[in-house]
């Protein structure tokens, strides 16, 4: 869990972790310099647990949420069989961990595996809202190159997936930890399970760093970001990071990365042909239309 001035909702998230049907868990927090009661709330929660070492707190790097999550994930003082990312303001349904582990334990230990899924929104008062979009296309590297499939608050992964992030390095300037995990695990030929049933109540409030991605307003916002160059800048970051971790990708996915990279630098016919050769796709028809329009205006 990464925290920063999270006193408003943190107790509810911690309580939902304590209520998990899978009871063998530890909480490791990286706090990015909170000045409110965040650390006091964590200390109170720690005191309520039966094991003195069940809750640990580290100082974060103070360079934003993505870097905070990545450096925490790459902290080799933390060792477990499986790892889950948690935001500070959500609520986990009781069987979240159990559901994820039921699938993860079917994957051979040496194969990188990532469980993720939908979320159900809730407002600041905890009232349920709509679910995130339901995706049905396969979770692959070709999709990961142009789309982050699921929020980090839904993600649980095995030691082999964690080893990938360690091997790639905790120093990278990533766009987001969830997108990076999706890129690495699929790029290395690992397995990804996308759960259509939400097990996280994703709180929407005025302090969200990243909001929900459902609804027409969110889709128009994403389209606007494409035309303003934000999507292109994200792709620049992802490609730089993937290039530095190229050795971890399968030969086939190295070729897809090269096709995508070259397509982005080409004139319009070459851009469109290169995207087809790379096989990239987003999960929905509107998303793919947006991708096509972004390619036309050199926004990829």
Image (cartoon, rainbow, N blue to C red):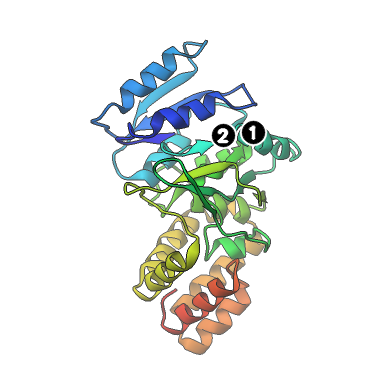
Q: What residue is at 58 percent from the left and 36 percent from the top?
A: 93
Residue 176 x, y percent position in the rendering: 43, 51
Question: Which numbered tag is attached to residue 83?
Answer: 2
In the image, 9: left or right of 110?
A: left
Please tell me which residue lies in front, 187 or 210: 210
176 w.r.t. 23: above or below: below
Question: Which numbered tag is attached to residue 4?
Answer: none
In the image, 157: left or right of 57?
A: right
| Outermost residue, bottom side | 269
Residue 221 x, y percent position in the rendering: 40, 68
Please tell me which residue lies in front, 182 or 11: 11
Please tell me which residue lies in front, 222 or 269: 222
User: Circle 1 sits on which residue?
Assistant: 95
Secondary structure under badge 1?
A: loop
Quadrant in the picture for residue 175? bottom left
For the residues carrying marks 2 and 1, which lies nearer the camera in this image?
1
Secondary structure under badge 2?
A: strand
Q: Residues within 10 Å of mark 1 (few under 14, many from 20)?
A: some
Point out the image quarter for the C terminus: bottom left
Q: What residue is at 44 percent from the left and 30 percent from the top?
A: 12
Quadrant in the picture for residue 141? bottom right
């Amino acid at each position: 869990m990464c925290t920063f001035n999270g006193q408003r909702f943190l107790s509810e998230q911690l309580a939902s972790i304590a209520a998990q049907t899978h009871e063998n868990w530890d909480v490791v927090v990286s706090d990015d310099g909170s000045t409110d009661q965040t650390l006091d709330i964590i200390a109170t929660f720690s005191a309520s647990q039966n094991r003195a070492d069940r809750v640990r707190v580290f100082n974060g790097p103070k360079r934003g949420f993505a870097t905070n999550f990545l450096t925490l994930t790459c902290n080799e003082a933390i060792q477990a069989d499986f790892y889950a990312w948690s935001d500070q303001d959500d609520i986990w349904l009781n069987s979240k961990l159990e559901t994820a582990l039921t699938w993860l334990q079917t994957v051979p230990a040496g194969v990188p595996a990532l469980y993720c899924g939908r979320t159900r929104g809730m407002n600041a008062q905890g009232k349920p809202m709509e679910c995130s979009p339901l995706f049905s296309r396969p979770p692959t590297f070709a999709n990961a190159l142009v789309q982050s499939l699921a929020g980090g608050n839904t993600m649980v992964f095995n030691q082999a997936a964690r080893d990938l992030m360690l091997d790639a390095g905790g120093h990278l300037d990533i766009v987001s930890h969830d997108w990076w995990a999706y890129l690495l695990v699929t790029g290395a030929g690992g397995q990804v399970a996308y759960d259509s049933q939400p097990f996280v109540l994703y709180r929407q409030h005025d302090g969200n760093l990243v909001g929900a991605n459902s609804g027409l307003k969110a889709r128009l916002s994403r389209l606007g970001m494409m035309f303003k160059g934000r999507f292109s800048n994200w792709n620049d970051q992802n490609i730089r990071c993937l290039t530095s971790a190229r050795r971890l990708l399968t030969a086939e996915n190295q070729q897809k990365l090269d096709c995508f990279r070259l397509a982005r630098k080409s004139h319009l016919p070459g851009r469109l042909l290169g995207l087809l050769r790379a096989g990239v796709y987003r999960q929905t028809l509107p998303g793919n239309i947006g991708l096509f329009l972004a390619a036309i205006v050199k926004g990829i």
